[in-house]
Amino acid sequence: MLSLPANMIRGQTGNMKYPFFAHNSIRNREVITTNHHCELCGREPVETTVHHLTPKELGGSFMPTANLCIPCHKQIHSLYTNRDLVTLGLTDLQSLRADERIIPYLRWIRKQPASSIPRVRKSHQVRKS
């Protein structure tokens, strides 16, 4: 039987996860870094994840990325499908900040403590697709 290094843990799904990876609802390949600022909401110090501004499934694997706090990253993917991000032209931070669906969220999240990770529910539009 294989013995595991002390720095590895077994997740609920049985996959091996390293401690510096993944919040439960974020994919394992998205590395979380600490003590950074979120490029979308500007809160700091927060844990950040890598957000591909152009979704990888639509050709964005080697395109620009942004370091976003976990709540902002979750909120983007709860409001928009990957296809929406491209078709609405939300492939840079300025256009994301200016979009009418995320402005109220940004106003609210900036007032929250950096340690908070609020629950996020997918929008009806995203749930339908």
Image (cartoon, rainbow, N blue to C red):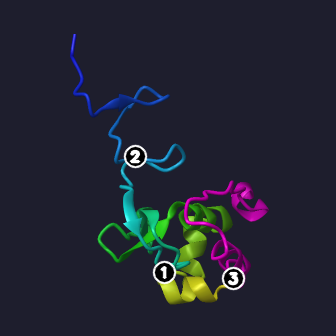
Residue under the point 69% across and 61% down: 126
| Residue that badge 2 annotates | 28
- In the rendered image, which residue does mark 3 sit on? 103
First along the sequence among labels 2 and 3? 2
In-front residue for pair 104/7 = 7
Question: Magenta region: which residues?
Answer: 100-129
Q: Secondary structure at mark 2?
A: loop
Q: Residue at x 61, y 57 (%)?
A: 117
Place residue 72 in its image quadrant: bottom right
Dot 1 amino acid type: Thr
Task: Examine the residues drawn in magenta and state their main secondary structure.
Answer: loop
Looking at the image, is mark 1 or mark 3 earlier in the sequence?
Answer: 1
Going by the numbered disc 2, the residue's amino acid type is Asn
* Mark 1 lies on residue: 91
Work out how far the residue at label 2 is from the one at label 3, CA to CA, in angstroms.
28 Å
Q: Judge from the rendering whether residue 3 lies leftward or rightward of residue 128; answer left or right.
A: left
* Residue positioned 56% across, 59% down in the render: 115
Picture layout, residue 109 above or below residue 97: above
Q: Which of the 4 image quarters holds residue 30?
A: bottom left
Question: Of the residues tagged 1 and 3, which is closer to the observer?
Answer: 3
Q: Position of residue 124 (x, y in %)?
A: 78, 60
- The answer to whether 108 appears left or right of 47 in the picture is right
Please state which of residues 105 and 42 is positioned toward the viewer in this rendering: 42
Q: Position of residue 76 (x, y in %)?
A: 59, 68
Task: Locate residue 60: give its quadrant.
Answer: bottom left
